């Protein structure tokens, strides 16, 4: 009897030792990985320190007016949209992160925008591609880059910026972006705490007599829904009803600030609205020809399968824009191979060129989708939009550009996964 008990105790002791060894190994791996990744971030900052600040003839400095961050000018305002930069911030992604930094720096230095708006997925803390769960690393690297460039910028959150398994929450990254001492050129505002999302805020352009010429409205399109916590089923979220009400309130307040005149506005977020999917399908079903409600503007849709990966939910954002009559255009990202723009029921909806070198397998070897979008806001409230590809000669980084194919994207198995819109 005692021998049996002793054997059982020995088995439990052996089991405990095995568990202890496994825990110790995991802890050692985690510690080594953390040290290595800290070095990766340090190296990225070292690379960024070699980049020259943007040289402006006379840089516009925003000021606070009527409770809004405002660029005051009687000239055009130049805005650059970047999207889906996807900086991993880990030891696996270090080389591709350098290419992304180089691309962003080259485009910003050449274009000299007054404001850069980033429509989500700055960070990409997917461990098997980045080598880290630390989403703050990618955020810090990008914010450091923009501060080095000396360019004012405004981010909106994407679904990958704060994954469920990431170390840091949206509120934590929001506090990072809001740190004006560390990043004085970042114009991010967390926005109201009693509605969905973080980073619902407004930046204005106004002339010297005080009239708002354009409002740039950043919104959080959130992440995933329907218990798809990791985004595996592509169940993407949307802009929620309380955010729509916040938008309505902002437009009404902007109208008051603008002495009763409805200002023109542009909306920036990450995940396209359901109406973008509706517009594309209507355009597609009509043989890629305009319809009564859809007008093709520019670009292509080359994503696979659904083409437009919007939320299946719709809580009224587009309808509010249509009803109030202020917002003339919406800019978003999320679908890295799309840069198409369609005008739907009078509102222009635009995918931005992506930067991504990391998230789509083999994407670093393809280049037709990589670049930026330049938006010029004129004094009369109208806007001009131009898509710019990174591989033009005018964009010169501090290291040589990689050689890429301008053919349709294939994944790393060599499979064509695009569905051209033309």
Image (cartoon, grey):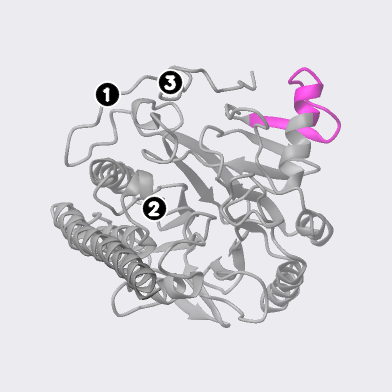
Q: What residue sits right under mark 1 in the picture? A: 403
The quarter of the displayed image where residue 178 is located = bottom left
Circle 3/circle 2 CB separation < 8 Å: no
Q: In which quarter of the image is the C terminus?
A: top right
Please give the residue where the numbered disc 3 appears in the rendered image.
413
In the rendered image, the quadrant that contains the N terminus is: bottom left
Q: Which residue is drawn at 24% across and 31% down?
A: 401
Where is residue 2, by image quadrant? Answer: bottom left
Q: Nearer the viewer, mark 2 or mark 1?
A: 1
Q: Distance between the residues labelled 1 and 3?
A: 19 Å
* Towards the viewer: 374 or 337: 337
Which residue lies under the disc numbered 2? Answer: 113
What separation in Å lies between label 2 and label 1 (alpha carbons)?
Answer: 26 Å
The residue range painted magenta reads 282-297
Front in this rendered view, residue 302 or 262: 302
Q: Does the magenta stretch include residue 143?
A: no
Q: Residue 353: x percent and y percent?
A: 48, 38
Task: Point out the tag, 2 or 1, that comes first from the N-terminus.
Answer: 2
Q: Badge 3: how crowded within 10 Å, few (<14), some, or many (20+)? A: few
Q: What element carries label 3?
A: loop
Q: Is residue 303 above or below residue 310?
A: above
Q: What element carries label 2?
A: loop
Residue 105 shows in the view:
yes
Task: Determine contact: label 2, label 1, CB under 8 Å.
Answer: no
Which residue appears at 42% of the width and 77% of the height? 175
Other-residue count near label 1 (Cα within 10 Å), few / some / many at <14 / 14–19 / ≥20: few
Q: Which of 224 and 158 is in front in this view?
A: 224
Q: Residue furthest front?
A: 1
């Amino acid at each position: 009897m005692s021998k049996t008990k002793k054997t059982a105790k020995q088995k439990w002791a052996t089991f405990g030792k095995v568990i202890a060894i496994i825990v110790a190994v995991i802890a050692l791996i985690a510690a080594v990985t953390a040290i290595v990744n800290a070095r990766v971030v340090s190296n990225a900052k070292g690379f960024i320190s070699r980049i020259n600040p943007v040289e402006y003839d006379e840089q516009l400095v925003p000021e606070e007016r009527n409770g809004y961050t405002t660029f005051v000018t009687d000239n055009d305002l130049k805005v650059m949209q970047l999207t889906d930069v996807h900086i991993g911030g880990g030891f696996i992604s270090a080389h591709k992160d350098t290419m992304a930094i180089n691309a962003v720096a080259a485009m910003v230095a050449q274009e000299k925008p007054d404001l850069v708006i980033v429509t989500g997925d700055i960070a990409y803390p997917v461990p098997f591609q980045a080598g880290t769960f630390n989403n703050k690393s990618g955020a810090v690297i990008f914010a450091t880059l923009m501060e080095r460039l000396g360019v004012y910028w405004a981010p909106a959150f994407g679904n990958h910026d704060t994954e469920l398994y990431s170390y840091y929450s949206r509120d934590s990254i929001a506090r990072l972006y809001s740190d004006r001492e560390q990043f004085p050129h970042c114009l991010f505002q967390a926005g109201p705490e009693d509605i969905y999302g973080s980073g619902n805020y407004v930046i204005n352009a106004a002339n010297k007599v005080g009239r708002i010429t354009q409002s740039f409205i950043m919104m959080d399109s959130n992440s995933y829904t329907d218990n798809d916590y990791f985004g595996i089923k592509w169940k993407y979220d949307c802009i929620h009803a309380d955010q729509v009400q916040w938008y309505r309130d902002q437009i009404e307040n902007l109208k008051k600030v603008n002495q009763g005149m409805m200002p023109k506005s542009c909306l920036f977020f990450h995940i396209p609205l359901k109406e973008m999917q509706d517009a594309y399908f209507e355009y597609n079903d009509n043989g890629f020809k305009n319809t009564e409600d859809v007008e093709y503007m520019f670009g292509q849709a080359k994503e696979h399968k659904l083409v437009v990966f919007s939320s299946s939910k719709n809580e009224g954002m587009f309808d509010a824009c249509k009803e109030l009559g202020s917002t003339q255009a919406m800019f978003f990202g999320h679908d890295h191979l799309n840069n198409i723009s369609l005008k739907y029921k009078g509102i222009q909806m635009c995918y931005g060129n992506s930067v991504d070198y990391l998230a789509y397998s083999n994407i670093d070897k393809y280049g037709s989708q990589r670049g930026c979008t330049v938006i010029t806001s004129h004094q009369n409230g109208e806007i001009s939009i131009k898509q710019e590809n990174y591989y033009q000669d005018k964009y010169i980084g501090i290291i040589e550009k990689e050689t890429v194919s301008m053919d349709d994207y294939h994944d790393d198995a060599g499979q064509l996964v695009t569905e051209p819109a033309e």
